[in-house]
Image (cartoon, rainbow, N blue to C red):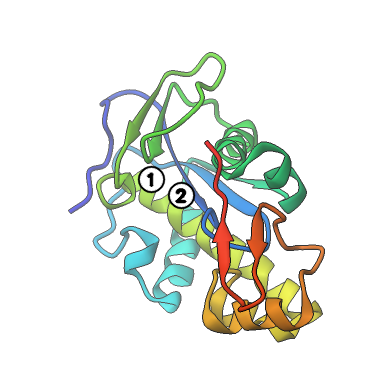
Amino acid sequence: MLLPYLHKDVVEAGCDEAGRGCLAGAVYAAAVILPPDFRNEQLNDSKQLSERQRYTLREVILREAVAWAIGVVSPQEIDELNILHASILAMHRAVDGLRVRPQHLLIDGNRFRPYPGIPHTTVVKGDAKYLSIAAASVLAKTYRDDYMLRLHAEYPAYGWDKNKGYPTAKHRAALAEQGATPYHRRTFHLWGDGQLELKFGE
């Protein structure tokens, strides 16, 4: 069972991102403040859930959360900042969008840049430990998947309806044959044999 909070009687927002390891598309993040008495036995790290479970849980989160927001950083910004800093910026933008100001942030992972005026705690594998981070992981994942489906309609050859921009064999083959789209991140090198060297800066 996931924990409802780290600090009792403190307004906490869980934050997580989706799309960090992709070759194409924006990186998405979500920030979610849940009621202190929120409980849901199905809610977990979005990677451990089926697509159907994620979308079902999204409706529960949107209905029951005290506040939630999505932050997005474009592929062009990712190339300018590097993927780590872009992921952190996406989380900052999600916190910016909350209609309730949290008193503390729970961040999935071990890297974060302090958000002005709000203390934070980083939690490795936090999306499998705290309900608010798990809720953020579900929102970030599903909203990014919706976005990648829209991009797939524009560029169907890359299989984004299935791989969501991750470097699958089909995606790599399409890159080798057709080159990059405007939605591809330029911080990787595509070699003649279709192999990709990813460059994720610090």
Residue drawn at x 58%, y 67% is 196
* Residue under numbered circle 2: 136
Front residue of 45/162: it is 162
Residue 107 versus residue 131 in the image, above or below: above
> Based on the displayed image, in which of its 4 quarters is residue 81 positioned?
top right
State the image coordinates of residue 66 (x, y, percent, origin top left).
Answer: 48, 41
Residue 75: x and y, percent?
72, 53
- Give the residue type that dot 1 points to: Ile
Snapshot quadrant of residue 184: bottom right
* Labels 1 & 2 near each other (Cβ < 8 A): yes
**Residue 192: which quarter of the image?**
bottom right
Which of the numbered marks, if any, corresponds to residue 133? 1
Return the x and y of residue 34 as percentages of the image width and height: 40, 42
User: Which residue occupies 65% across, 60% down?
Assistant: 189
User: In the displayed image of the protein, which residue is found farthest to the left?
Assistant: 1
Q: Is residue 71 above or below residue 10?
A: below
- Report helix, strand or loop for mark 2: helix
Question: Is 200 left, or right, of 34 in this rendering?
Answer: right
Determine whether 153 is above or below 200 in the image: below
The residue at 46%/49% (across/down) is 136
